[in-house]
Amino acid sequence: MKCEEFESIGLDAGRDSSLSEAEGTAAREHAATCSHCAALQDSWDAAGVELRAFAEDTAMAQAPARVEMRLRQEFRTRHVSMKVRRTAVIAGWALATAAVLVGAVSWVNWRGINSGAAAKQSKTSQVGANPAANNADVANNNAAAQPDSAESETLLADNELSDFTLLPGTSPADTLDAAILRVRMQRSSLGALGLPVNEERASEWIQVDLLVGNDGLPQAVRLPQE
Amino acid sequence: MRIAELERDDVLLRRAAKGDEEAFLLIYRRHQAAMYRFALRMTGNTWAAEEIVQDVFMTLMRDPKKYDPSRGALGAFLYGVARNRVMKHLERLPREVALEEKNEDGTGSGVVLQDASTPASWLEKRERVRQVRDAVQELPVEFREAVVLCELEELSYEEAAQMAGCPIGTIRSRLHRGKALLMAKLEMLRGVPRRASAAR
């Protein structure tokens, strides 16, 4: 081994594992025979000793405790905020789902109410075309749905009965179960019921409400105002 | 010793990534001293070393997936991150503060050497260490890195080359040149005539 080669690879031959056994041996032999390289090796080793002393001086050095504290705090902040973010996302999705559900239920209810109202309206309009049936239906509905309304109609009938003129030979008690029947007749027909008739207008057609008893005979008569 | 302390770094890191604080602290306690020493020896500045260590572990905390266990040990990965931070620091800032921590009155806190038999020998040794430290800090960054890794951290040439991201021959060359500069500097400081070949 020559001096240049020794200076480049032989100085640290003892610890350089990349050197072969033969290179290591050659370096040791060269240092033993060359005084210049031996002195260089001594100087190199002395520098190694100095560096080791320096290394020992800082061997026990470690980061201050405040670094660990800062890292710990950062770790907690980071992971707590991650948890909070995750919770917020889940809560957001839950709220959105709930809002959609509420909206859907409300819409379905609204649709149901609207279609019911439309059906009622069309039914009402159909009934309006046939007033008699309508009245009957309404009367039936009222009688079925509201028991109090029957009583109020009875009261109304009493009032109406007060407008009737009892036919001769009829007592007021006979009219309790009577029904009202509207008929059209000639004025002269009133005479047959025992009522006075103006001869001059005897041929006139008039509308008359008859109160017909259970036996089918008229009990009282009323001339509705036209 | 608890079972958690025997767990591998990658297992601990996975746990830490899921929010296990104890696992993260175990990793930190395993590696912080080596990182701190490396940063301190490279920068010669305790504050910078502290910042670098914190930065290294912050990086690990923020993005643990950056570490791939199939590519090497966690220690090597952390060394790589620390090295990048050190290089950035050295590029950005001139050397400002001595390695030794200062007390409030400006005096050095010092390190008590266990083999110091007398105050005189202790002072002499402190002075030698200070000279070596100053000489190391004055080395160019590449040479300093080789000296710190191979001589102070006592890594093998292969490990140092892996760490520095260069071939073994480059590390060897840098170490030789760094050590030669170091010897020349120390001999000059001690009044020893400089060898002609030392700084070659």
Image (spheres, rainbow, N blue to C red):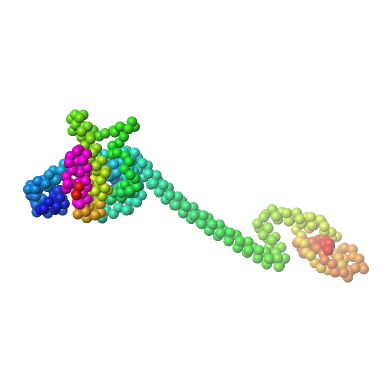
The single residue placed furthest to the bottom in the displayed view is A203
**x and y percentages locating residue B198 in the rendered image:** 18, 46
Snapshot quadrant of residue B26:
top left
Q: Is residue B67 visible?
A: yes
Image-quadrant location for residue B32: top left
Where are the magenta residues, as a range?
Answer: B172-198
Seen at 7% across and 49% down, the residue is A29
Q: Quadrant of residue A137?
A: bottom right
In depth, the one of A73 and A7 nearer the eye is A7
Horizontal and vertical percent position of residue A7: 15, 50
Number of labels in the image equals 0
Left/right placement of residue A222 relative to residue B198 reads right
Residue at 32 percent of width and 38 percent of height: A65
The quarter of the rendered structure image containing the N terminus of chain B is: top left
Q: Nearer the viewer, residue B110 or B139?
A: B139
Query: Considering only vertical position in the picture, is A221 above or below B80?
Result: below
Q: Residue A71 magenta-drawn?
A: no
Is residue A91 left or right of A125 when viewed as pictured?
A: left
Dominant secondary structure, magenta? helix
Answer whether residue B175 is magenta in the image: yes
Give x and y (percent) for residue B73: 25, 51
Please report the residue visible at 43 percent of the width from the left and 49 percent of the height from the top. A85
Near-viewer residue (A220 or B23): B23
Question: Which of the pair B15/A147 is nearer the observer?
Answer: B15
